[in-house]
Image (cartoon, rainbow, N blue to C red):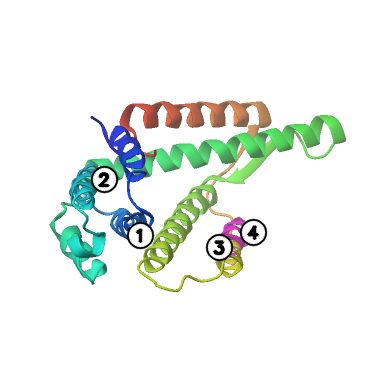
Amino acid sequence: MNTKDLIQLNNEKREQLTKENKQYYGDMLVYIRTNFTKSERYIEEVLMELLDHLLQAQANGRTAKDVFGDDPKAYCNDIVGEIPSEKKANRLSFIFYLVMNLGGLVSLTAGTVGLVLFFIFGLGEGTIAFPLGSGILVILIDLILLLLFVMAILKWVKNSTFKEKQPRKWVEFLLLWASTALFIGLSLLVPRFMPDIGHVIQISFPVFILTGAVMYISSVVMNKKMQLVK
């Protein structure tokens, strides 16, 4: 059984829990899963063991609090400490997938928009010109910004668990909206203020679109084979 199957089975089995136990276990699940440096396979196996243990206890009339105690966060921290870190090769594969996926989407979008503006509205010159060094730096900085954004979201989600009083939905929405707007704004400002570095190259919009399509399709095939993103 692969990781994706374990996640699906967990989703199905979790429906057997009572409302109280489901809430308790759900917080444990989110808290443990947000440790992205740990092996995803081991995380899902541990979560399945915890769920099976809880279901068996529930059948005997016990609650999640009876099984895991009054301090689930400490319990989860002990569990996370025993889970091995994700293999370096898997991390590098995930980073490569992100570069191919996001780079492909950006190339497809920029190429398509540029092509439409050029042929329909007569705007532009039919090509995209940029300094090679600046382009590489922009991509690297945007990837770092994306990593920081994802880490911040995971930290926020992790900190939202095990709270008796949850924040209002509109407050969560505003915080998420503000964080996303900040990330997008910074990503757009990077190329605007990046100085020209390296030789200027010109790429036609069709080539840009084709390159983006190849990169994106390659990332999809890679993800399908390696299950990097569920």
**Residue 95 in the image: above or below residue 108:** below
Disc nearer the start of the sequence (3/1)? 1
* Residue at numbered disc 3: 176
Q: Residue at x 31, y 40 (%)?
A: 13
Q: Mark 3 falls on what kind of element?
A: helix
Disc nearer the start of the sequence (2/3)? 2
Dot in front, 4 or 3:
3
Q: Residue at x 44, y 57 (%)?
A: 150
Q: Mark 2 falls on what kind of element?
A: helix
The magenta stretch is 180-191
Which one is nearer the viewer's eye here, 46 or 221? 46
Dot in front, 2 or 1:
1
Quadrant occupied by the N terminus:
top left
9 on left or right of 212: left
* Residue at numbered disc 1: 20
Asked whether the residues under the numbered discs 3 and 1 touch, taking CB atoms below 8 Å apart as contact, a structural biologist would say: no
Disc nearer the start of the sequence (2/1)? 1
* Residue at numbered disc 4: 192
Dot in front, 1 or 4:
1
Is 14 covered by the magenta stretch? Answer: no
Disc nearer the start of the sequence (1/4)? 1
Mark number, residue 63: none
The residue carrying pointer 2 sits among few (fewer than 14), some (14 to 19) or many (20 or more) residues within 10 Å by Cα, namely many
Q: CA distance from mark 2 to mark 3?
A: 25 Å
Disc nearer the start of the sequence (2/4)? 2
Mark number, residue 40: 2
Q: Mark 4 falls on what kind of element?
A: helix
Q: Which three-letter amino acid code belongs to the residue tagged 3?
A: Leu
Q: CA distance from mark 2 to mark 4?
A: 38 Å
